[in-house]
């Protein structure tokens, strides 16, 4: 049965590939024949039917791949290398697209969905040429997961249904047992075990897929010499693509903010850049479509940008999956031997697009309107140029490894390298791109909706500009802003918000439908303001003010910018008092974390633990002492209580960390959100795991009940020896004897109880030590001397429990997330409106039945 799933999955891949090929051929022939008739319709039906078969086969591949992940079929390399037995279902979904093959399959799936929508919505004129392009793209994409070996050194694609024994090759375990199957997988990358990784990739790949549709319409328009008709149906898809791709990018940014610990949401990583570039070009392209539909200007540029958007998506795919970035990016996939296939894929569509565009260039209508400074179109074109410059700067720098590889392939040496300060390199230029975008969105929107006579432009802009300057001056004084570039971005961002807000108010008063573009532009402006404050004025509040160096072995920035927290000891940090309260684990089925001290992890199963005490919440018992719980031991959560000394406000954060054998300390922040700022905190250093903790040699103490002794400089009293009726981990039965020592220890800030256990179970002696992590003590009840009435207590000492924490304050970062939502909402409103307009133009009234109240008879317009 297990092998059958893989056979069905791989068979579905082959069917999907062949069906896409047939669909592309059928639609191509239907387009080529052109005039409606029996031959054309036969080819059209063939293409349509083959594409539907293709879509069903793609679903079959998805079901098969998820089946091998969900049911832990580790005989398959994909399941073994990306999942493990104890992953929650939500992270099994993340496993699906962690690998290259799964992410290609996700992309293929969205193309199949969009193709199905086009079959029902594109209309007779556009179905064949547009679906011919979509199916052609699917042929290339499905080939990436075919996994067919053509020669010993040449294969077509990488199959997600490859057996582990075939991947591993000739290793001893398979010689001894050809049917060997591992009991567990290697697991999901810890950094991807986040709910954003469940929803971010599907959103991002839907954005990728949506860029294909305007590209396909543009190619179809050139192919059929319908140079302007394609704009109307393409516009709604462009708006949807810009919104979804933009939101997908920002989901990734929030994932980085919430999961990684570099203190931000954007690091100008090459893979981040590779997605950012086509989004800028897509936004520029949809603006040009809008301009041409209004003023019949810029059609050639509109073709170029719509075609370039999809080609840049293909180039981004090559960058991230060919291995050309090497160690330049923390996100990129390693080369699976598909780089040559990716180059062919990219080259095929680049050459097709360039040849077709060049062949039709002279036939594309020229501009019908002269642009002037008081035309809105002029300012839109300037904005498009600014977006293009922003995209080009990022593209040119991100592509440096490609230049270097190309030069070295020619036999020459290249010393080209990324700038030493990549963040500074990009930020300095992109900041002014942001200034230009903010200024132009405000200006163009006002001009777009209000007629302006020659020489009256400044009159229109005067009020929004004065209000922007007034508010900017107020914010500058209150925030002590001194950087000139930041001041300019603040002013233009406020101008964009005010100008677009005024325009929306004007439309409401006129009774006009609200402009989706105006909402989106306000969102973009708020995003720019959020980036300005959260990045430009983010500051560290965990500065080391103790005058002490924590450790000479630690990097300088950790000693300088972090605070050392001993467990249960309050430490001042900025205007906060911080108390580290202990380590916590995630328990299956519980929304709250559980204190590690209350869990006895089973020695033979690290994913299960026995409760040492009743687990309560709001007076309700959630689990009882002795219950066995399923836990997720990979991550430890560190409880840190914050008390604001200025406002008396209290809150608790649980930054997460994992000591990974291969990747070292993987720390993720926890974030407290306020309306005007975030507190962002993560651990920089944690104690060694329990199995690596260094304990001193055991020191024995012979004591009687009531005796006082000093343990690791702490006064300790043996209050009593008492029966122990239920000891976690010992499994006592009738006839067994168990005693526990009751010790009271005076810590610096509180008293602690320790209860080490001495038991006689059958003919064996058992001992359960009790550990006080706050004090670095482990106490063991070693022996009983009934003749002397003495008890032997063994004590080991270790480093007290501590963490080193970094905390930052990020002002007004919520403007970034609010702006992202408004941008998506505005583009969604615009997309829905344009889609409805398209449907209304497809069906036009041409007559009535000739009686009062008769409904119009409609016909499909070719």
Image (cartoon, rainbow, N blue to C red):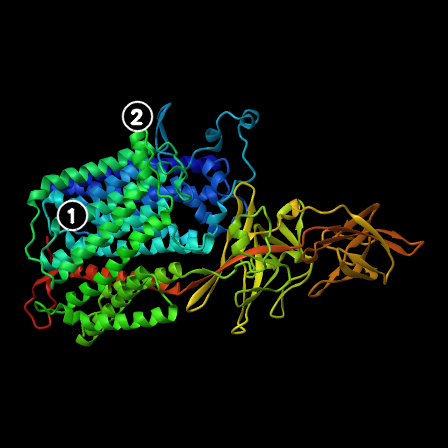
The residue identified by callout 2 is 411
Residue 430 makes an appearance in the image: yes
Q: Is residue 471 left or right of residue 757?
A: left
791 shown above or below 169:
below
Looking at the rendered structure, the secondary structure element under dot 1 is helix
Residue at left offset 38%, top offset 41%: 61
Residue 205 makes an appearance in the image: no
Query: x, y percentage for residue 152?
Result: 38, 23
Q: Nearer the viewer, residue 632 or 681?
A: 681
* Pointer 2 local density, CA inside 10 Å: few below 14, some 14–19, many at least 20: few
Q: Is residue 692 left or right of residue 206?
A: right
Q: Nearer the viewer, residue 769 or 460?
A: 460
Residue at left offset 75%, top offset 55%: 712
N-terminal-most mark, 1 or 2: 1
Residue at left offset 51%, top offset 74%: 647
Query: x, y percentage for residue 329?
Result: 40, 42
The outermost residue toward the top is 152
Compute the Cα span from label 1 to label 2. Answer: 37 Å
Q: Quadrant of residue 474?
A: bottom left
The residue identified by callout 1 is 303
């Amino acid at each position: 049965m297990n092998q059958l799933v893989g056979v069905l999955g791989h068979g579905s891949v082959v069917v999907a590939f062949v069906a896409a090929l047939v669909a592309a051929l059928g639609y191509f022939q239907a387009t080529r024949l052109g005039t409606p008739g029996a031959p054309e319709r036969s080819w059209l039906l063939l293409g349509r039917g083959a594409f539907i078969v293709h879509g069903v086969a793609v679903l079959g591949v998805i079901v098969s791949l998820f089946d091998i992940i969900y049911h832990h079929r580790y005989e398959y390399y994909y399941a073994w290398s990306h999942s493990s037995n104890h992953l929650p279902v939500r992270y099994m979904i993340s496993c699906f697209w962690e690998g290259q093959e799964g992410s290609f399959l996700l992309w293929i799936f969205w193309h199949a969905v969009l193709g199905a929508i086009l079959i029902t919505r594109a209309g007779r004129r556009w179905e064949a040429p547009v679906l011919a392009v979509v199916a052609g793209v699917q042929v290339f994409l499905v080939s990436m997961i075919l996994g067919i070996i053509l020669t010993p050194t040449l294969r077509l694609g990488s199959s997600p249904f490859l057996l582990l024994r075939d991947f591993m090759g000739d290793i001893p375990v398979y010689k001894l047992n050809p049917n060997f199957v591992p009991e567990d997988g290697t697991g999901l990358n810890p950094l991807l075990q986040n709910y954003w990784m469940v929803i971010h990739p599907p959103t991002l790949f839907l954005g990728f897929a949506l860029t294909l549709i305007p590209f396909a319409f543009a190619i179809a328009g050139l192919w059929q010499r319908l140079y302007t008709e394609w704009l109307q149906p393409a516009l709604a898809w462009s708006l949807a693509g810009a919104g979804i791709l933009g939101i997908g990018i920002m989901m990734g940014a929030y994932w980085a903010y919430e999961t990684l610990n570099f203190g931000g949401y954007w690091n100008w990583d090459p893979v981040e850049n590779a997605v950012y570039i086509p989004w800028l070009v897509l936004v520029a392209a949809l603006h040009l479509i809008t301009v041409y539909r209004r003023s019949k200007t810029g059609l050639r540029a509109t073709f170029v940008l719509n075609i370039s958007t999809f080609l840049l998506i293909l180039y981004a795919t090559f960058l991230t999956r060919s291995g050309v970035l090497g160690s330049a990016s923390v996100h990129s996939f390693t080369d699976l031997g598909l780089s040559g296939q990716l180059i062919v894929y990219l080259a095929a569509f680049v050459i097709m697009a360039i040849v077709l565009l060049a062949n039709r260039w002279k036939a594309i209508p020229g501009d019908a309107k002269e642009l002037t400074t008081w035309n809105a179109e002029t300012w839109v074109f300037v904005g498009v140029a600014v977006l293009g410059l922003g995209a080009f700067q990022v593209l040119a720098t991100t592509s440096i490894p490609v230049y270097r590889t190309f030069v070295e392939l020619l036999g020459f040496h290249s010393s080209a390298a990324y700038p030493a300060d990549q963040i500074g390199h990009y930020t300095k230029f992109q900041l002014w791109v942001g200034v230009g975008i903010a200024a132009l969105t405000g200006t163009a929107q006002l001009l777009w909706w209000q007629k302006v006579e020659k020489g009256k432009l400044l009159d229109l802009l005067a009020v929004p500009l004065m209000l922007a300057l007034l508010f900017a001056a107020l914010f500058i004084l209150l925030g002590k802003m001194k950087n000139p570039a930041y001041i300019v971005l603040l002013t233009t961002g406020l101008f964009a918000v005010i100008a677009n807000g005024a325009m929306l108010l004007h439309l409401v008063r006129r009774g006009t439908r609200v402009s989706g573009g105006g909402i989106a532009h306000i969102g973009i402006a708020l995003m720019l303001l959020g980036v300005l404050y959260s990045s430009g004025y983010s500051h560290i509040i965990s500065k080391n003010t103790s005058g002490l160096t924590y450790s000479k072995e630690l990097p300088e920035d950790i000693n300088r910018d972090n605070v050392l927290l001993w467990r249960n000891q309050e430490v001042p940090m900025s205007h906060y008092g911080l108390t580290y309260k202990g380590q916590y684990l995630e328990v299956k089925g519980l929304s709250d974390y559980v204190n590690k001290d209350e869990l006895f992890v089973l020695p033979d199963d690290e994913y299960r633990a026995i409760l040492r005490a009743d687990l309560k919440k709001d007076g309700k018992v959630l689990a009882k002492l002795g219950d066995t719980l399923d836990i997720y031991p990979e991550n430890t959560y560190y409880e840190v209580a914050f008390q604001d000394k200025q406002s008396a406000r209290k809150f608790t954060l649980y930054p997460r960390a994992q000591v990974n054998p291969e990747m070292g300390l993987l720390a993720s922040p926890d974030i407290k959100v306020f309306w005007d700022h975030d507190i962002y905190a993560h651990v920089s250093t944690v104690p060694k795991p329990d199995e690596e903790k260094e304990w001193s040699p055991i020191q024995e103490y012979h004591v009687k009940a009531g005796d006082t002794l000093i343990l690791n400089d702490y006064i300790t009293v043996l209050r009593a020896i008492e029966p122990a009726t239920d000891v976690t981990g010992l499994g006592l039965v009738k006839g067994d004897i168990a005693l526990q020592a009751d010790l009271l220890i005076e810590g610096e800030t509180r008293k602690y109880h320790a209860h080490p256990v001495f038991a006689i179970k059958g003919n064996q002696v058992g001992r359960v030590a009790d550990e006080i992590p706050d004090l670095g003590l482990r106490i063991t009840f070693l022996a009983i001397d009934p003749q002397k009435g003495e008890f032997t207590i063994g004590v080991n000492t270790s480093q007290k429990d501590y963490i080193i924490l970094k905390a930052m304050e990020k002002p007004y970062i919520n403007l970034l997330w609010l702006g992202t939502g408004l941008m998506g909402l505005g583009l969604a409103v615009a997309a829905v409106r344009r889609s409805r307009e398209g449907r209304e133009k497809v069906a036009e009234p041409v007559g009535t039945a000739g009686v009062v109240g008769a409904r119009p008879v409609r016909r499909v317009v070719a």
